[in-house]
Image: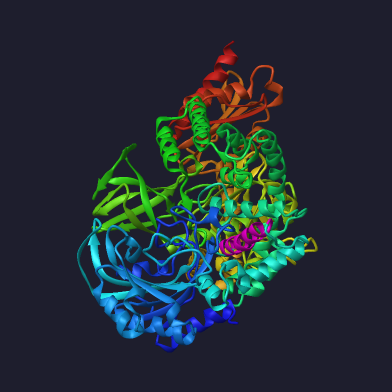
Amino acid sequence: MQSTNDIRRAFLDYFAQADHEIVPSAPLVPYNDPSLMFVNAGMVPFKNVFTGVETPPAPRATSSQKCVRAGGKHNDLDNVGYTARHLTFFEMLGNFSFGDYFKERAIELAWNMVTREFGLAADRLTVTVYHTDDEAYALWKKIAGLPDERIIRIATNDNFWAMGSDGPCGPSSEIFWDHGPDVAGGPPGSPEEDGDRFVEVWNLVFMQHVQQADEITGNLPRPSIDTGMGLERMATVLQGVHNVFETDTFCNLIEASEDLLKAKADETTIASHRVIADHLRSTSFLIADGVMPSNEGRGYVLRRIMRRAMRHAHLLGAEQPLMHRLVPTLISEMGQAYPDLPRGQALITEVLEREETRFRQTLEKGLRLLDEESAGLHEGDNLKGETAFKLYDTYGFPYDLTEDALRNRGISVDKDGFDAAMARQKAAARAAWKGTGAAADEELWFDIAEREGATEFTGYSAVEGEGHVVALVVDGKEVQSADSGQDVTVLTNQTPFYGESGGQAGDAGEINGDHRLEIEVEDTSKPLGRLHAHNGKITSGRISVGDTVHLAVDAERRDQIRANHSATHLVHAALRHHLGDHVTQKGSLVAPERLRFDFSHPKPMSPSQIMAIEAEVNAEIRANDEVVTRLMSPDDAIEAGAMALFGEKYGEEVRVLSIGRSDWNSSGYNYSVELCGGTHVRATGDIGLFRIVSESAVSSGVRRIEALTGEAARQWLVAREESLKTVAATLKTAPDEVEGRVAALVDERKRLERELAEAKKQLALGGGAGGAAPAANEDIGGIAYSGQVIDGIDPKELRGLLDEAKSRLGTGAAAIVAVNDGKAAIAAAVTNDLLERLSAVDLVRAGVEAVGGKGGGGRPDMAQGGGPDGDKADAAIDAVRKVIASKVSA
């Protein structure tokens, strides 16, 4: 028997020998098609090749593409486990011709593959063609020799494929396998075609036309081929079974769940075992491709799949989480074909175990209420929609899980009642929101968010992608379109652009679309915390609501932001190591050109502390350890060593970022473990270099570090080195000797300043040209007075000069005005024997007023002050003279 792995390998090898390039499977998230929740067909990764936007990898290609159908219009979730062929995860084998061969070669390759390579009996194969495709009909007769009754013309869209209302399209031809008369059903096109006897195993699309608005308008210049063979369906044929769950991969997965649960699969339990096996595949591959469980978008679909499987594990009697224990079996089955699976094993296991642990708590409460509310219901009855909504709203019990739980009892759920209860809750939430006094522009965003839901952010793993335009805002109002030259805010259903939040700057880049549309996105904001608003200017073309656009983040700018953001985490850890556990983040700015980090600390950091922190951060950067992101509950994250910001509100799930070495101390944790929703480097070495450029106070008890990383840090260091070289050249010395040369010059300057001050002092004491007023004593009513104006003397010298004047006077009063840079400093002194009659404070205040100042003070024997008008220094001396005269005459 050919195993599923053998079939996959045989298919790829066959087409490789026919000059097809084997192309690896694309991720399940289709960043090139915003209309799809997940990749659901083998051709999806080649969509832009077929439309001419991208260059094909080769003229011919072949692949085994992983696919998921569990959300949106392609949703097989509810059927899985209960039919012979429905799966949420499947593999699509395909061969593609990009303008190389066409119908004849495609039919020839397909027929030889199924009859010669796979050895299928030709008399059990039937094909269909589009009813007007006479060419394909004739080729099947010529190449396969099939009789007319087994080449069936189909007039419906089942045999006509289109990429959309506009774009490439063409007829298709399907190959069916007849499982035999023991299985109910008829051939395609017959009234019994929905039975399982005739099963489609391969579809050949002949892409040859172009259509606009669903009307064919011409032919492609280079017709192409797109085919898809369901691997699991072909495995049923080649392994001689009727049900995809009876193929080897599923048998091994089901056997593993039987062993772990100690519950054999029988008529009453087989559906649950099949659900677990299928959902294990889809959830594991989705997690490996970066999708994490959440309450919106792709994450919500993932959670629905998980919880459905976990519900069936509960039905089988699982007392402990089961799903994560099946991961090793899955990897042994499929890990060789898909290396991303073993690489992501630790993350897959962790997410599955955490989700199932949490869900078991939800399940117990929800099922208890469900049992109570449905106790009186019988087959054919309806559960009230209000009850289903209560389960959803209070216990987190999804609507489809309620349906699934009641399915075996033949009880349905009042969906209209559920929707009505949901609508009432939204109306109440809206009324409460308006009651908060929110601004008008916030109401605009609320309207959009309520109508369209949250923007799905795809930028953790991509910097480009496509999105549907769901809203346009111009001048604070919603519009349906905007034209070249207008400033516009664009909202799409999904985006790789990060919206400014958590201190990280929003992304910039470009939005492009049909009709020469080009928009320069200057920044991205995040209204209400759940919408991503691209703010920019339309440089050409027109954009309208409903358009599909290509979004491209400025990758170089994003890389700089990533480096700076990851560096803030390393800085936080280093600060705590060197300053103490009291250090907590108080704010941050992560921009492309720099980073800023505010933290609690009561005093300035010393130069040695700054150097130590910088050295430690750079050591982590050089270690080049992988940066790991996990999704956890806040409590689990903190228990695992993650730092949370005090007072910050966190949802029921958080992204936990682990950066740096896990062996830096004995704790076993990484160097830095924090809760963070921003974008980060893949490894610490991507930061390149870290340099602290300043440390300062922000407020009482809060300090701020500003730093640079990567090329910005290197350029900063280069600029400092160039400045050093310039200084060295000016000093006529080598850069290494600048420090010593500057120290010598400083010492020399201090010596010269001392000598100059002494010379000015001696000149002042001796009178002459240095003083604008004579130094000689004068008699004022019997009191000796010495008044003097001196230019260019340091005001600090005034007290010493007055002491000299008092000594010379013996008894009396003295005043000196020093004039520097147009300003005046005045000091006055009175000998002790005259203090009952005169006060130096009164004398100084009179002099200060004369030079345009106010106040002045000191002691009765010595006082000092100043004013802005040095030109009136002589008037100050005279003012002191007049005060003395008034005191004497009194």
Position of residue 8 relative to residue 775, above or below, is: below
**Residue stretch in magenta:** 268-287
Q: Is residue 790 above or below residue 883?
A: below
List x then y, in percent, for residue 791. 49, 41
| Residue 5 seen in render | yes
Depicted 665 relative to depicted 792: above or below:
below
Identify the image quadrant of residue 816: top right
Q: 52 and 62: which one is in front?
A: 62
Does residue 421 appear to the left or right of 261 in the view shown?
left
Q: Answer with left or right where residue 564 lies relative to residue 468.
A: right
Q: Which quadrant holds the C terminus?
A: top right
Residue 753 screen position, x and y as percent: 57, 53
Closest to the observer, 821 or 722: 722
Q: Quadrant of residue 96?
A: bottom left
- The quadrant in which the N terminus is found is bottom right
Instruction: List the single residue furthest toward the bottom.
Output: 17
